[in-house]
Amino acid sequence: MNNIDILASSVKTPVRILVLILTGLLYTGTFAQADEVVFTSAGDTPWQLYLGSSNNWMVPVQGPETTSFKSKVVTVRRIDNMATADAIQAEWKGGLGQIYWQQSDPQDYRTLAEQGGALSMVIRIDKKPKKSVDLKMDCGYPCAGSLNMTKLFKAVPQDTWFRVSLKLSCFEEAGANLGNILAPLVVATKGSFKLRISDVALLAAPPQASLVDCG
């Protein structure tokens, strides 16, 4: 049994993504045609990046490094990937913390969901999670659709960029009101974890190889 078979057999849900990562086929450095860009190296989107912890859930990320208010629960750094400061690294050190992109006006993604659209992102795991990691779509507290991604993030190789896409219908089934989305991507955990993100977008036609199960 080779390394691909060993890793693929270790977890059921993300088998396809594991094989593609290990064979170098998943992320080529190109960004798919986006229906709505949330985060990109160009930086010209209406979405503002925030981080938060129990002391303050809405701290805007500004400058080269931002840390949660009165704590070191979560820190976001601007980092270089393919160009200068074209990606972020988020690091959690314990205690509930989150990062998320938000704008003032809620967005309606029901039509995009009907077209088979997905939330798609290019990420890299720098330190595997110690506790559960959730990806959420926020539709105004307490409304949210949350997907547990812990198994996937623990299974994939560290220090490898890959694209992962999750159907909008997954978030809807988990409780999100897709007609009133305030934050299309929230990453939250209570344990230590470190990941990088270079692109986030909503795609009507996500790359099929990047799609993973709802969780």
Image (tube, rainbow, N blue to C red):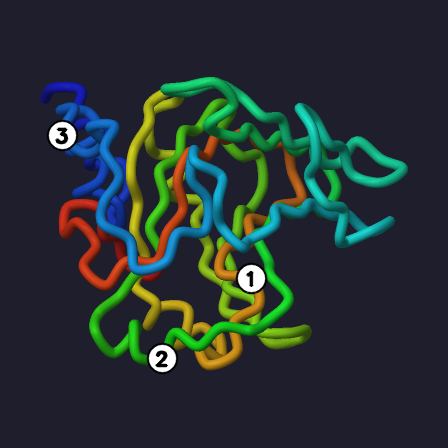
Residue 104 position within the rendered picture, expressed as x and y whole percent measured from the top left: 64, 66
The residue nearer to you, when weighing 200 against 6, is 200
Q: How far apart are marks 2 and 1 (CA)?
A: 15 Å
Percent position of residue 205, x then y:
18, 59
Q: Quadrant of residue 123?
A: top left
Mark 3 and mark 1 lie on one chain; the one further toward the N terminus is: 3
Vertical order, 104 against 88 (above or below): below
Residue drawn at 40 percent across, 46 percent down: 200
Q: What amino acid type should be assigned to the residue bearing mark 1? A: Ala
From the viewer's perspective, tell me whether residue 161 is left or right of residue 174: left
The residue closer to the viewer here, 34 or 139, is 34
Residue type (three-letter) at the residue carrying disc 2: Arg
Q: Mark 3 points at which residue?
A: 25
Q: Are marks 2 and 1 in contact (CB under 8 Å)?
A: no
174 or 34: nearer the viewer: 34
Which class describes the residues within 10 Å of circle 2: few (<14), some (14-19), or many (20+)?
Answer: some
Three-letter amino acid code of the residue under disc 3 = Leu
Where does the N terminus fall, quadrant-wise? top left
Q: Which is more N-terminal, label 2 or label 3?
A: 3
Percent coordinates x, y for residue 20 in the rendering: 16, 33
Tag 2 secondary structure: helix
Number of the label disc, if any, that sits on residue 110: 2
Callout 1: SS:
strand
Which residue sits at x=21%, y=74%? 115
Secondary structure at badge 3 equals loop
